[in-house]
Image (tube, rainbow, N blue to C red):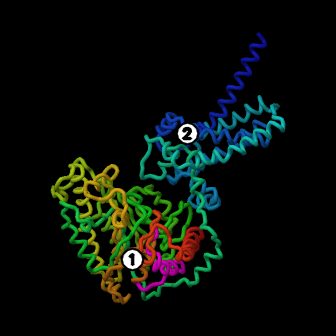
């Protein structure tokens, strides 16, 4: 009987030890979704892969520290303390900033601590946090009381350590694999436009470890900072006070001129307003990196001068910072949620002093889910007028939301039929709704241009679009309208990835800058659009911009789709005779992305 009791006690202790080892990562997983609904945790519980991939790292860390210290209670306390610290950092970041904890944040931990103090975040305890801490402390006491005398021999610890060491590469491959990562998701909480929700849909430890693969911006082959600086043989140039003009830049969501494609049955007469504006502007084509989605790519290429973007986790070089240094007020608007592409944080990293969003701002001006351009463009003008009181020149960058997809295929907003003919009803309704949005946008835009035209202060406007609009699942409506699907020809590629840009100036700006701002410009990548704007103004800009302007003459189009325009030829590989120059281009880009200068 006594032996049986001992067996039961031992079994109970073993079961409890297993429970404590598993309970801690499960409690930490309950913190993984921050302030989002508790139903997220139920989504984790229903997905074995998410559970396993988030529990395993905590157990693995426990095993590593046990091999080091040969004490279970020390291993449990240290490994649990570290993982809890990470979990709480993620929890508080989500709570205060709706921004999850990435591996890259560990590289700027000092800046994060400073930000926490400077912005006066008040850390707090709640039931979930208290329960997790209680599990950690009680588990530590449990292992101290029942397992403090249990030790592995040096030989066993060496064997286990060797096994862990051999397994590490395979573990890294598992957690960094993009295909596996894309296939494992808690779809019940996923908003595909929210980077945060993409993250929390997989727990915390799994996406955190996966983010290691994107935490480091690997330098180009042969790169050194000295080599990059050798290419910056330019001096930073200051804008003369007498030549400072106001710049209003607007990226128009999915605005495309379909009149250039000759689509049967499509009434393009509504483009007359925009074509009239083009006739009095400097215009051309952008070849962007994205198709039917990925707005932030075009936006941030324009603002930073980079053709390839990194994971923004801190202050980053941009032309916004340069203009701010030159005495400009720098601000903007996007009448949608601030978490959308994490603009609430990243726009600050790019140098904007003030940025307006839907929350606590445009939601007071409109009851629409996607506020109309009539409100946005009116507010852009009002902000411009308010800035006059400061006596400072003005730069704003805004993007609309009215024309954002998807475009309903079940009903139409207007009785006017823009697309007729042998198309599916869904295709016609979606295209008709898209045209309704962008044609109304043109009316509102011309009203803003009218205000700027009559303003006595010098103003230039930079207008462009991010990508072609989304058109049905798998963009099936494009196929109905005769667009190629395989992109085998240069023409097909250009159709899919081309948008228009437009640089307009009022009479006062034309006089000050001695330029009429009329003509057809080159086809370029979005990373060069600010260069082109400065060229039209007769400005040189910072040293990096001057170097990129020279590169633009040879490499006017550089994309992340492995397509380039080199010496006016679209190619898939950089020609041998241009490899050395392109390497210098890559060196400059990498230096500018990773060495904050402001």
Secondary structure under the numbered disc 2 in the rendered image? loop
Q: Residue 418 sits in which quadrant?
A: bottom left
Number of the label disc, if any, that sits on residue 544 = none
Q: Residues within 10 Å of mark 2 (few under 14, many from 20)?
A: many
Residue at x 59%, y 57% (from the top left corner): 215
Q: What element carries label 1?
A: strand
> What segment carries the magenta color?
537-558
Question: In the shown orientation, is residue 461 left or right of residue 117?
Answer: left
Q: Which mark is residue 247?
A: 1
The foreground one among 580 and 510 is 580
Mark drawn on residue 30: 2
Residue 539: x percent and y percent? 45, 84
* Viewer-nearest residue: 538 or 247: 538
Picture layout, residue 296 above or below residue 8: below
Alpha-carbon neighbours of circle 1 within 10 Å: few (<14), some, or many (≥20)?
A: many
Front residue (pair 248, 543): 543
Residue at position x 46%, y 37% in the image: 39
Q: Is residue 551 visible?
A: yes
For the point 27% across and 64% down, the residue is 374
């Amino acid at each position: 009987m006594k032996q049986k009791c001992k067996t039961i006690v031992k079994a109970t202790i073993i079961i409890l030890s297993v429970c404590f080892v598993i309970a801690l990562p499960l409690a930490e997983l309950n913190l993984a979704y921050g302030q989002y609904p508790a139903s997220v945790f139920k989504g984790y519980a229903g997905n074995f892969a998410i559970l396993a991939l988030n529990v395993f790292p905590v157990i693995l860390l426990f095993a590593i520290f046990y091999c080091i210290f040969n004490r279970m209670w020390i291993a449990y306390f240290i490994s649990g303390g570290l993982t809890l610290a990470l979990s709480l950092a993620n929890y508080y970041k989500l709570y205060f900033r709706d921004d999850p904890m990435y591996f890259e944040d560990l590289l700027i931990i000092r800046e994060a601590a400073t930000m926490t103090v400077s912005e006066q975040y008040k850390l707090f305890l709640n039931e979930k946090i208290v329960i997790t801490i209680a599990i950690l402390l009680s588990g530590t006491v449990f292992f101290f009381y029942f397992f403090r005398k249990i030790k592995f021999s040096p030989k066993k610890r060496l064997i286990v350590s060797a096994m862990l060491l051999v397994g590490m590469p395979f573990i890294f491959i598992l957690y960094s694999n993009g295909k596996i990562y894309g296939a494992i998701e808690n779809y019940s909480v996923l908003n595909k436009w929210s980077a945060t929700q993409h993250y929390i849909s997989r727990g915390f430890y799994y996406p955190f470890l996966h983010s290691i693969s994107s935490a480091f911006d690997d330098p180009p082959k042969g790169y050194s900072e000295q080599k990059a600086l050798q290419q910056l043989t330019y001096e930073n140039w200051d804008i003369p006070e007498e030549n400072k003009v106001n710049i209003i830049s607007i990226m128009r969501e999915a605005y495309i001129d379909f009149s250039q494609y000759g689509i049967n049955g499509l009434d393009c007469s509504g483009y007359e307003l925009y074509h009239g504006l083009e006739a009095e502007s400097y215009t051309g084509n952008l070849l962007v990196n994205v198709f039917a989605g990925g707005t932030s790519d075009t936006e941030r290429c324009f603002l930073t001068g980079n053709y390839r973007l990194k994971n923004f986790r801190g202050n980053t070089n941009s032309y916004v910072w340069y203009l701010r240094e030159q005495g400009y007020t720098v601000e903007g608007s996007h009448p949608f949620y601030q978490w959308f592409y994490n603009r609430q944080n990243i726009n600050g990293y790019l140098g904007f002093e003030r940025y307006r969003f839907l929350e606590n701002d445009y939601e007071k001006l409109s009851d629409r889910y996607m506020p109309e351009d009539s409100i946005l463009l009116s507010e852009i003008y009002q902000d411009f007028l308010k800035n006059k009181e400061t006596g400072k020149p003005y730069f704003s960058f805004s993007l609309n939301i009215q024309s954002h997809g998807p475009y309903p295929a079940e009903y139409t907003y207007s009785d006017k039929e823009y697309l007729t003919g042998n198309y599916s009803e869904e295709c016609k309704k979606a295209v008709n709704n898209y045209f309704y949005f962008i044609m109304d946008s043109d009316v509102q835009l011309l009203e803003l241009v009218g205000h700027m035209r009559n303003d006595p202060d010098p103003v230039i406007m930079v207008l462009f679009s991010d990508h072609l609009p989304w058109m049905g699942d798998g963009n099936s409506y494009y196929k109905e309208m005769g667009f190629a699907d395989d992109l085998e020809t240069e023409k097909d590629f250009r159709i899919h990835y081309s948008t228009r840009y437009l640089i307009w100036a009022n009479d006062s700006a034309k006089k000050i800058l001695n330029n009429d701002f009329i003509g057809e410009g080159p086809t370029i990548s979005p990373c060069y659009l600010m260069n082109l704007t400065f060229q039209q103004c007769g400005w040189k800009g910072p040293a990096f911009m001057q170097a990129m302007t020279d590169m633009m003459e040879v490499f006017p189009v550089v994309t992340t789709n492995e397509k380039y325009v080199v010496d006016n030829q679209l190619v898939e590989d950089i020609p041998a005779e241009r490899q050395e120059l392109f390497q210098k281009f890559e060196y400059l880009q990498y230096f500018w992305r990773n060495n904050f200068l402001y």
